[in-house]
Image (spheres, rainbow, N blue to C red):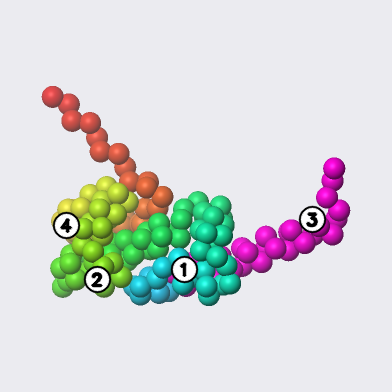
Amino acid sequence: MCRPSWARARAEHQRLRDLALLRRVRDRMDREYARPLDVEALARDVNMSAGHLSRQFRLAYGESPYAYLMSRRIERARAMLLRDDLGVTEICFAVGCSSLGSFSTRFTELVGMSPSAYRRRASGAVSGAPPCVAKQVTRPVRNREAPAPEPQLA
């Protein structure tokens, strides 16, 4: 049985409305990544339940709101690690993480190496390079796209 055209139109209107709200949530996470944000507060701001927001966010963007927020924080941390004036712990707190352990674990998952190793490797890779090249070389990685470690041959 087909749904009436008014029902399809209403469903499409709701889907577009949800996408607009999800963009608002994502934009807020992009702007306020360093602040303490949780799914309940984000959902409350767009009049959704936390469960509905999480499900719709994953459908729209391919990852949970928490994973997206952590990816944003790691992106910023990568940029900050290229500077020598802040330590890893200071960067961890500056990007909004409250635990050095979870920050380091997530950083390693996304980037494929620890924050300290990244700093050592990246500083050599971009020294003397123009900013546009450095930005491309240190491009953020999303959705667990870190390269798999190469097998060690005996």
Quadrant hosting residue 47: bottom right
Q: Nearer the viewer, mark 1 or mark 4?
A: 1
Q: Position of residue 98 (x, y in %)?
A: 26, 68
| Residue 40 numbered mark, or none | 1
Q: Is residue 89 left or right of residue 102?
A: left
Q: Name the kind of residue labelled 1 in the image.
A: Glu
Would you place residue 53 above or below residue 94 in this image? above
- Taking the spot 18% from the left edge, 30% from the top edge, the residue there is 152
Secondary structure category for the residue under label 1 = helix
Q: Nearer the viewer, mark 1 or mark 3?
A: 1
Q: Name the kind of residue labelled 4 in the image.
A: Ser
| Residue 93 numbered mark, or none | 2
> Alpha-carbon distance for marks 1 and 3?
30 Å
The number of numbered discs placed on residues in the rendered structure image is 4
> Alpha-carbon distance for marks 2 and 3?
47 Å
Quarter of the image for the C terminus: give it.
top left
Which residue carries the number 4 mark?
116
Q: Is residue 61 magenta?
A: no
Q: Name the kind of residue labelled 2 in the image.
A: Phe
Q: Residues within 10 Å of mark 3 (few under 14, many from 20)?
A: few
* Main SS category, magenta section: helix
